[in-house]
Image (spheres, rainbow, N blue to C red):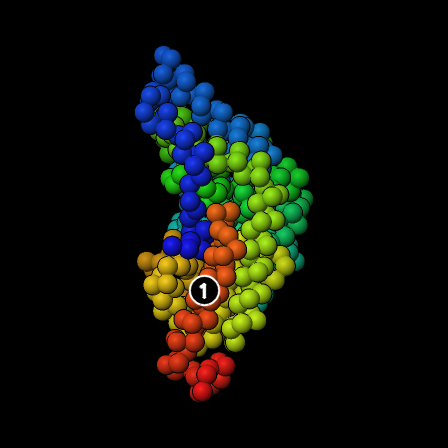
Amino acid sequence: MIYLDNAASTQIHEDVLNSMMPYLKEQYGNPSSIHRYGRLAHKAIEKARKQIAALINADPSEILITSGGTESNNTVLKGISGKNIGNKIITSLIEHDAILEPCKKLVEEGFIVDYLHVDHFGIIDPSELIDCLTEDTCLVSIMFGNNEVGTIQQISEFAKICNAKKIPFHTDAIQAVGKVPIDVKALGIDFLSISSHKLHGPKGIGALYIKNDMNIDPVILGGGQEYGLRSGTENVANIVGFGKACEIARNNLIENISYVKNLRDILVEKVLHEIPEVTLNGDPKSRLPNNAHFTFLGVNGEDLIIKLDEYGIAASTGSACSVNTQRASHVLQAMKFSHEQITGSLRLTLGVFNNHDEVEQTVSSLKIIVEELRSFSPFKEKYSFGLKA
């Protein structure tokens, strides 16, 4: 298989897996225990916390370990909303469901949620945020890099606006951490969500960066682990693996960005030049280096994915987390895409384990599959598609 769905999840790095094994076999103590087994487990967690913090230039004390990106997003939304510092939250129309669904729940509880719009490239205008801010605003949450089309927002500008008004600013950076340089201090970010399995770590583990002067209410109560903000016995092996994945990502960040971006650019250029009636979606420049999101007019995206799978290529139309909802992409709807454009979308996301031959094979397969699907497309009278006579 050629795996081009790295936005959904990534292959675990071999060094990450090796780092985890001792804590699944020999070092199985509870980190809260005071004997040697417990102390070794606790020490391993604190080492991982430092590794996670270093990737985004945070202090280790600012890292809250969670079960993943969804919990991190829920934690900041529910934690800040319980502080009684305002009843208005501002977010955007293209956020992940892990932001949008908690916001819907908060509306039921009496909160006001304003949704910022995007242009055709998926870019949010900072001036709209300025217009939406009020004295009752308790949180602004804007995604760093979009999980579908890959567009990167002007996070430093949004943070600057919020900092000036002393309004907490959160960014869902789950798709961006480990793929682009992120310095939470330089950017002025107050809260930031991370997920391990997006950067070659294990699933079921993540983190929430909480700036030292920020306070939120705990969501999970119990024995007081994680500074009392997230009680429960820690998943030591996964935390260790997460930390190792962050260390590897930090040490190889610039090299990996260059490598993956080069593959992505080759893929985009070949698809656009060798297949007719195709567009690249998202901002052409301000985008995640591994993301290529296309619209193939006259082709159903789900049919395209099924055929690609038959050819040994794993791809997607968008977020794997919302596949069970069976609804059109809210991201593409917010970008004012037509029904035809939405249904013909395909997301290809690369990673460090992909190579040039796989890109070439993918383009060759796409050319055959797209021509086949277009041969019986209901839109073939509308578009020539460059079909053979």
SS state under label 1: strand
Q: Could you tell me if residue 232 is visible in this image?
A: yes
User: Which residue shows up at 40% across the image and 34% down it?
Assistant: 17
Q: How far across and down, in percent of the image, does residue 109 sit?
A: 40, 49
Residue 351's x, y, as percent?
50, 49
Residue 226, quarter of the rendered image: top left
Q: How many marks?
A: 1
Residue at image location 34% in from the left, 63% down from the top: 310
Residue occupied by mark 1: 346
Compared with 254, 30 (above or below) is above
Residue found at the very far top of the displayed protein:
35
Q: Quadrant of the C terminus?
A: bottom left
Looking at the picture, tell me which residue is in the foreground, 29 or 268: 268
In the displayed structure image, the side of residue 189 where residue 14 appears, left or right:
left
Q: Residue at x 38, y 13 (%)?
A: 36
Hey, what amino acid is under mark 1? Answer: Leu
Q: Position of residue 278 (x, y in %)?
A: 52, 72
The residue positioned 39% from the left and 68% from the top of the image is: 304
Q: Is residue 114 visible?
A: no
Q: As displayed, is residue 339 above or below residue 163?
A: below
Where is residue 15, by image quadrant?
top left
Q: Is residue 325 above or below residue 26?
A: below
For label 1, the crowd category at 10 Å Cα-Cα, with few meaning under 14, some 14 to 19 and many 20 or more, is many
Q: Quadrant of the N terminus?
A: bottom left
- In the rendered structure, the answer to whether residue 106 lies left or right of residue 335 reads left
Q: Position of residue 293 (x, y in %)?
A: 50, 62
- In the foreground, 61 or 129: 61
When asked about the image quadrant of residue 129, the answer is bottom right
